[in-house]
Image: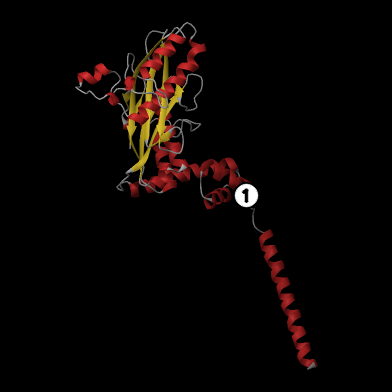
Amino acid sequence: MLAAATSRFLVGQMGRAGSSRALHSSRAAWDNMPFKVNVKLVAQLRKELQVPMNKAREALTQCENDYTRAHAWLVKDAVTSGAASAAKLAERPADCGLVAAVALSDTDSEPGRVGTRGGLVELSCETDFVARNEIFRSLATRIAATAATLSTPAGTEALTEIAIDRLVELPLAGDGSESTSVREGIVEAIGKLKENIILRRALQTPESASPDAAWQPVVAAACHGGETPLTGKYGALLRMRFRAADPADVRPAFEALASRVARVVVGFGPRYLTAEQAARAQVTDDQAVLLNLPLLGQDVTVQAALDALAKEHNANVEVLGFERFAL
């Protein structure tokens, strides 16, 4: 019995010694690694570029924890992998997507709902799941902002359709550099989202609502049926102008009304601005005429609201036109 107990004791001691040696061996191997990936930089890259964790770690490994180099590595990798994915997915149907409508002001390049010029685009993908993704929504908004920045020929008064082959070659708005085109932005998104993405149509507003400097342009953007105020299943741009003694003081009031009228366009889908235009088209439905429609939530027509605001501020105001995209 004593021999058996001694044997069990020796076996236990050998096991503990072996475990200790293995632990020291593992620790030595870990300490001999060239470097450890910085987890804070991994999180920062993932947040900024919306890349998987393994990609962020790979970039930092390749670039030895140099954030600037890793960022550039990931951007280049996204374009390369996106191009390969785009070639494979090009024939797949893209029947879902978003409309993005934005307005830009003369003093702020950040896309918003009111300004002096605007862009409206339809961007398609394969599934509603991707259409709700932040990468896709951001891309649609940035393309609409790109459309809004285009110059228009002198004397242009109507909302103008933009040729897609021209738009995709322009620098993508909000990228922070001149190096990424709209086409490259789409390709990069394809690589990340693994779905076919197609820019269907786009339009822009003229740079000025009138050659007369006394008239002040107002552009309002509105969307409905989406995750953000600037994207949805329906989107519209509205062009308006006003003339007043102190335009800077009254501009907020006219921008607020323009924004509400743009929501009427999105909600009702009118086809004509005035009753006269509808009559020439032999249309008698008041629902087809924007100026005859009620402001949402109020018992007053768009025309009556315009007249009341003009009287309040001793100003002139006119709706010049609108456009609506719907999926």
Q: Position of residue 121 (x, y in %)?
A: 36, 32
Does residue 108 lie above or below 24 as drawn?
above
The C terminus sits in image quarter: top left
Using the image as rendered, state which of residue 57 and residue 266 is in the foreground: 266
Q: Position of residue 271 (x, y in %)?
A: 28, 25
Using the image as rendered, state which of residue 205 and residue 226 is in the foreground: 226
Q: Position of residue 88 (x, y in %)?
A: 34, 50
Residue 19 in the figure: left or right of residue 105: right
Residue 217 in the figure: left or right of residue 57: left
Residue farthest toward the front in the current orientation of the protein:
299
Using the image as rendered, state which of residue 300 and residue 197 is in the foreground: 300
Give the residue at x 46% y 41%.
135
Does residue 238 lie above or below 16 as drawn?
above
Does residue 181 lie above or below 24 as drawn?
above
Q: Residues within 10 Å of mark 1 (few under 14, many from 20)?
A: some
Three-letter code, disc 1: Val
Q: Regarding mark 1 in the picture, which secondary structure is present there?
A: helix
Q: Which image quarter: residue 196?
A: top left
Q: Which image quarter: residue 307?
A: top left
Does residue 39 lie above or below 174 as drawn?
below
Look at the image and tell me whether residue 201 can be seen.
no
Residue tagged 1:
39
Q: Position of residue 164 (x, y in %)?
A: 32, 32
Look at the image and tell me whether residue 287 can be seen.
yes
Using the image as rendered, state which of residue 240 and residue 289 is in the foreground: 289
Give the residue at x 78% y 88%.
6
The total of numbered circles placed on residues is: 1
